[in-house]
Amino acid sequence: QLQSIQLTCKPKHGRNQINPLTIYPHSTSLACPNPLHANLFKLMKPFHHHLLPLSFITTHRNPCLRHHQYHYMPYSQHPFTNKRSSFLVPINNNNNKMTSSDSENNINGNTNNDHEQLILKERSKSAFRYTEDIAPGLKIDMALYTIHHTSLSEFQEVQVIDSYFGRTLVTDGKTQSAEHDEFVYHESLVHPPLFWSSILSGGSAGSGGTPMTVFIGGGGELATAREVLRHNTIERVVMVDIDPEVIEVCKKYMPQWGGDAVANHPKMDLIIGDAHAYLMETTETFDVIIMDISDPIEAGPGIALYTKEFYERAAQVLNKDHGVFVTQAGSADFIPHPHAFPLNNDDDNKESSCFSPIMNTLAMVFDHAVPYSVAVPSFGADWGFVMAYNYNGSSSSNGPNDNNAMAGQKLLVDLMPETIDALIEERIESVPGVPEHEFRSLGVKRAVSGNERGGDVLKHYDGEAHRGLFALSKPLREAIKSDKRVMTEANPIFMY
């Protein structure tokens, strides 16, 4: 006899809007402006038997007006009453119905292990979906197995889920890091600039030396710091991230990214604060600066960290002879889509690729700005990075030496694989206390003792992979050449 349920939800964290939601028991869908997730279902639990069949869709509108959806497909019955299975593990009413004996066993209280096995079996057939916008007209859609955490911090929406790509951190509806391939992103971001800093200073395998000091802007998952701490030359790492909730959530649900072992490492100085303000005010200098920050989206927290003004300050904070700056630079598709590069350098295009504008901006500040990329499947695209440094051909008597200033860029790209592999064997060590991921594909998954050295520690980066990073496709190189945009505080450029 229930006609409808009227829920009025007032979010925490100081937001003022009231979000009314009406649920009709026999409707095929419901939609709400905020991602209420499990909390919504807890409110609905007393009416649970009225609400099926039902399609559950939450739509989160982030600052770029993109949508982020979870779907719950209609089913005719739910024999479970357990809170985990009643809404996270739907039963397919065609192929996966429980028999009467199954229901009896569950009601009569079979062992927890049997129940867990049944949950896992049905979860694998779950109709929950995770959908993410990648570009205008392009989405990725995959199975959503578990929502471990969802909250709204002072700065962004934070979620940890299990999906097709394993354990995944999502902020403001965008995948930040996934268990399946996080090592590809983080090893590519960290090791090329650290080894190049060593080479610029005249370092070689077995000689110790630089880099010794590294600044990390962002990096809340702690995996960037994990990779830095694997270098045995490191003496001090300063990491500044603005959102403490991301760090705490990752420590709790994603310890394989670094967790307490990295956060509490004796060489680590973890600071909750504004990376932009910290670099503007610091009197310290660093061998390497790594910016592992949010994409430059409109109204996002990271836009000021992509401007010419910020890069000028970063250049002042780097050590002069061997300082290297690197930043993640958004999508860098092998064959760029037309949306990524505006026609006729149209500055009004506020949602495009930022890969070449970031490179152009760094090139105005440093002698060299070198773009590179790597495939990151969970991002739905090849991902770009830009490394920048000053080198005039006479950096060190033992380091690169060439009268042509362009040699600095050429040497970086053409480093012999044997040189990189020798540095890896001499300098890379595992970080004690960081557990291995459980969700790994063949060729990556391995037993880890915590005492590994050299190539046994890294899962992606080596001498051959280094050369591949800088082998950009011809279409991408041509698109970069045609894009003259520069990012400043007065004229920012936003990524989709």
Image: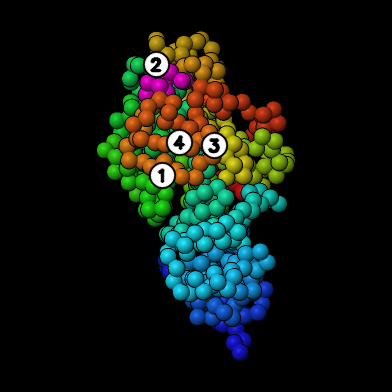
Q: Residue at x 53, y 33 (%)?
A: 443
Q: Residue at x 47, y 20 (%)?
A: 420
Residue positioned most to the bottom: 1
**Labelled disc at residue 256:** 1
The residue that mark 4 highlights is 446
**Label whose residue precedes the other's in the sequence (3 or 1):** 1
Q: Position of residue 292 (x, y in %)?
A: 46, 41
Q: Residue at x 57, y 39 (%)?
A: 376
The residue that mark 2 highlights is 204
Front position among marks 2 and 1: 1
Helix, strand or loop for disc 2:
loop
Q: Is residue 256 visible?
A: yes
Q: Residue at x 51, y 74 (%)?
A: 104
Dominant SS of magenta comes to helix
Between the C-alphas of marks 4 and 1, the distance is: 14 Å
The residue that mark 3 highlights is 442
The local crowd at label 4, few if under 14, some if 14 to 19, many if 20 or more residues have their Cα within 10 Å, is some
